[in-house]
Amino acid sequence: MVPPRKTISVPHLGGITVGYRLSSAIPSKPTLVLIVPFTTTVDYYLPEFENAELTEQLNLLAVEPLGHGETRTKSETFTYWDTALAFIQVLDALGFDKAFALGTSQGGWIAARMALLAPEKIQGIIPVGSCMDGETSRARDLGCWDGVGATSALVTLGGNFAPVPDFEPGDAYYDFLMEIGYGKTVPRSTRDFWADTIKKTYQGDDGKRRICQAAINLATRDSLHARLPYIRCPVLWLQGTGDVVFSAANAQEEIKLFTNSKEAKLVTLKDGVHFLSFTHPKEVHQNILDFTNKWQAKL
C-alpha cells in the first residue's frame, strides 16, 4: 500500500512546510530522494512507490519543491537554491544522514544543487531528462526547448498583483504539459488525472501566485556549468532520445562537465520521452538499483 502524502516543517526562509511521501525509514537501506518535474506532485512517482523491488531495497522519499503540491512558505519569492536547501533540511528532520537524489526535469538541477550545498550528505545524483544550464541559446542550439517562451504567459501574469480568485491553469496548459512530458500518445486517463490534480493544486489567487513563481524560477534560473566541477559524488544521467524538452545532444555535452565526480555516466534510452520512466520504466528502475547498490557499497 502506498503511504499518504504528509507535510513537514523546516526552518529555511523563515519556515517552509514541505509536502512529501516516504516509503520507509530503515537505516540499513539506501535512501533515494525523488524530486518531481514542473507543476506535478509526489504522485508523479506513484509507479516507483508501487514497485516492490524498489521499495524493498530503498527508502523512497518523494518531495515537492517550492511552488508545488503542498509545499508552502510565507516568502513571496524563492529560487531553486531555496528548494534544494529545504530538501536538505527535510533529510535532517527525518533523520537521514545521507541520501541519493534523483530528479526529473527541474528535479535534476535541484538534485545537483543539493549535491553542491551538502556534499557530505548527498551520495550521488540521478538527473532524468534534465539540463544543467539556464534557458540559454546554447541549450536551444543543441535541441532543447525555449523555456522562456513556454513560460512567458505565467511569468507576465506573476507581475500583475491584481487578485484572480477564479484562477486555474486551464485545459491548454494541461494538454501542453502532458504532450511535452508523456508524448503525443499520452493516455486519456493520465491526462485527466493530472488535469484534475494540477487544477486542485493551483486554484484561486494563491494557486496563481505559486505557479507563476514556479515559472519564474524555471525561466530565470542560473546555469550550473561553472559549479559542476565542485560536484564530487557520482552522477548517473538518464536521457531519452525522444525528449522534446531537453535533448540527448545537450546531455552528451553536459555530462562532460562533471570533471571531478567519482563517476559521470550518461545512459540514453531510444525514443524515451521527457518523463522517461513512462516509456522506459524497467530500464530506469534497473539503473536506479544498479547505481544505488554500487555506490552505497563503496561510500
Image: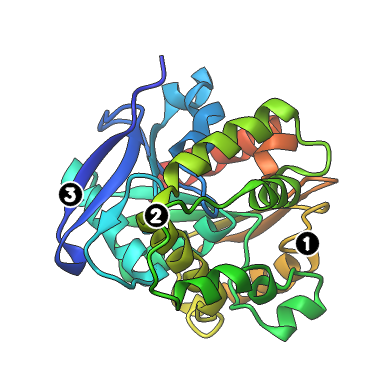
SS assignment at label 1: helix
Residue type at mark 1 is Ala
Give the label on residue 248, or none.
1
133 versus 179 height, above or below: below
Residue 224, position as x, y percentages in the image: 52, 78
- Name the one closer to the observer, 212 or 13: 212
Q: Is residue 46 visible?
A: yes
Cα distance between the residues tagged 3 and 1: 37 Å
Give the label on residue 9, or none.
3
Give the mark nearest the N terminus, 1 or 2.
2
Q: Residues within 10 Å of mark 2 (few under 14, many from 20)?
A: few
Residue type at mark 3 is Ser
**Residue pushed farthest top?**
1
Q: Nearer the viewer, mark 1 or mark 2?
A: 2
Residue pictured at 49% horizontal, 73% vertical: 216
Give the mark nearest the N terminus, 3 or 1.
3
Quarter of the rendering occupied by the N terminus: top left
Cα distance between the residues tagged 2 and 3: 27 Å
Viewed as shown, does residue 245 lie left or right of 66?
Answer: right
Give the label on residue 165, or none.
2
Viewed as shown, does residue 117 lie left or right of 176?
Answer: left
Residue pictured at 62% horizontal, 74% vertical: 152
Residue 142, position as x, y percentages in the image: 80, 75
Which quadrant holds residue 88? Answer: bottom left
Q: Residues within 10 Å of mark 1 (few under 14, many from 20)?
A: many
